[in-house]
Image: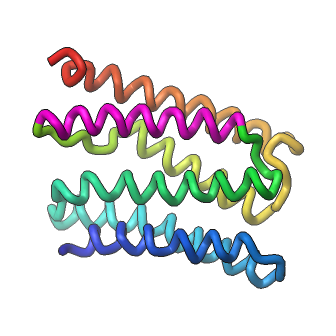
């Protein structure tokens, strides 16, 4: 197993620690959660960088990287609903996009193809991670301050746009 794939697995392993820390009250847990989320998000950048630089791109990596990203982002969004930092309808939209794209990926896999993350998908993930980090640091509801509203709207737009883009770019898989 190469380093990019190990980093994706490490990202997945950070999730239970992050969720535990977000569930606890002490202030140090809050800041530890920010650090764990930051580290996990950085592994997403690093695994992609190493895979491209050293030509360590694998079928497993094309699968595990977006799964690890989705698990990290969605589990954090779900925790933030409970903390009243994001509205549930926003997370439902994000979840619907992720499940739809995963369904497309499953159809592709059944046909012996793998759909790697696209450019808009990478922008979506980076935007969501930045947004979540901002909310974790500020601990303010997303729609309660002007920059939070702007970022929230951007997250909704880029999430839906990238989902539509996956279906347009891979429509041949659905028609075969």
Expressed as whole percent of the image width and height from the top left, the position of residue 72 reads 52, 60
Residue 102 sits inside the magenta stretch = yes
- Depth check: give the residue in front, 6 or 25: 25
Image colouring = rainbow
Q: Residue furthest top?
A: 175
Image location (x, y in percent) of residue 17: 58, 77
Q: Quadrant of the N terminus?
A: bottom left
Circle count: 0
What is the magenta range?
Answer: 89-111
Q: Residue at x 74, y 57 (%)?
A: 135
Q: Position of residue 31 (x, y in %)?
A: 73, 78
Percent position (x, y) of residue 5?
A: 27, 68
Q: Residue at x 64, y 35 (%)?
A: 154
The correct choice, above or below, for 154 with respect to 169 in the image is: below
Residue 171 lies in the magenta-colored region:
no
| 101 lies left or right of 111 | right
Q: Looking at the picture, does residue 141 appear above or below residue 113?
A: below
**Which residue is more in the foreground, 121 or 68?**
68
User: Height in image: 19 above or below 104?
Assistant: below
Residue found 46% across the figure and 39% down from its top: 98
Q: Is residue 92 left or right of residue 116?
A: right
Q: Residue at x 74, y 36 (%)?
A: 150
Q: Is residue 165 left or right of residue 6?
A: right
Q: Which residue is situated farthest in the right direction here?
A: 144
């Amino acid at each position: 197993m190469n380093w990019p794939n190990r980093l994706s697995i490490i990202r997945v392993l950070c999730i239970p620690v992050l969720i535990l820390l977000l569930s606890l009250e002490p202030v140090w847990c809050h800041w530890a959660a920010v650090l764990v989320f930051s580290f996990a998000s950085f592994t997403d950048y690093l695994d992609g960088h190493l895979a491209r630089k050293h030509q360590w791109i694998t079928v497993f990596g094309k699968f595990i990287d977006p799964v690890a990203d989705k698990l990290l982002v969605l589990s954090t969004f779900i925790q933030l609903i409970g903390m009243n930092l994001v509205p549930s309808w926003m997370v439902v939209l994000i979840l619907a996009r992720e499940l739809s794209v995963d369904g497309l990926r499953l159809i592709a896999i059944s046909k012996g193809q793998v759909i790697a993350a696209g450019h808009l998908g990478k922008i979506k993930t980076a935007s969501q991670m930045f947004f979540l980090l901002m909310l974790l640091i500020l601990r303010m509801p997303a729609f309660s301050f002007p920059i939070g509203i702007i970022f929230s709207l951007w997250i909704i737009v880029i999430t839906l746009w990238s989902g539509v883009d996956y279906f347009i770019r891979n429509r041949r898989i659905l028609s075969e």
